[in-house]
Amino acid sequence: KPVEGGLLLERVARAIDLDKTQRKTDVAQQAKQLTFARLSERERDVLSLAVHGMPNKEIARYLGISHRTVEVHRSHIFLKTNTSNLIELAALAHECGVVRNVDLSART
């Protein structure tokens, strides 16, 4: 069927704008994912436990490391993710889907 030229151009322009917006969102999401990819395995362990509400001393006991080591890992996590507090970090981690399920039944 014949299509009105102006309407077709408007819809194509709208589709291009939507695509640009989606690509920007995708790039931002990928950048966030890369942020978490830079974390070491132990930092990911500490991150998951901290986000689940464990204090540093309990994290240390759970992982069999020193309290000071947990503090160092948390510091590195904040630096690598460019976050300044646990709430920001937890929101970013959940948004990116990087928080692991943790079996907290092993807590002592």
Image (cartoon, grey):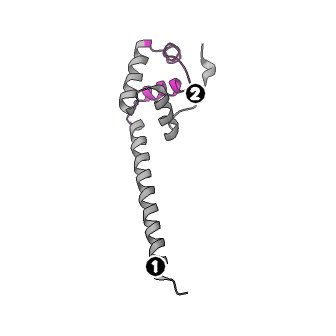
Q: Amino acid at mark 1?
A: Gly
Residue nearest the viewer, comparing 91 with 3: 3
Label for residue 75?
Answer: none
Most frequent secondary structure within the magenta stretch: helix
Residue nearest the viewer, comparing 51 with 43: 51
Residue 79 in view (yes/no): yes
Image quadrant holding the N terminus, namely: bottom right
The residue stretch that appears in magenta: 38-67
Residue located beneath label 2 in the image: 102
SS at circle 1: helix
Left-right relation of 26 to 102: left
- Judge whether residue 2 is colored magenta: no
**Extreme residue in the right direction:** 105
Label tally: 2
- Judge whether residue 50 is colored magenta: yes
Residue shown at 42%/56% (left/top)? 23
Left-right relation of 10 to 82: right
Residue shown at 64%/20% (left/top)? 105
Q: Amino acid at mark 2?
A: Val
Crowdedness of circle 1 by 10 Å Cα count: few (<14), some, many (20+)? few
Give the image location of residue 70, x and y in percent.
43, 18
SS at circle 2: loop
Q: Is residue 22 above or below residue 69?
A: below
- Cα distance in 3D space between marks 1 and 2: 56 Å
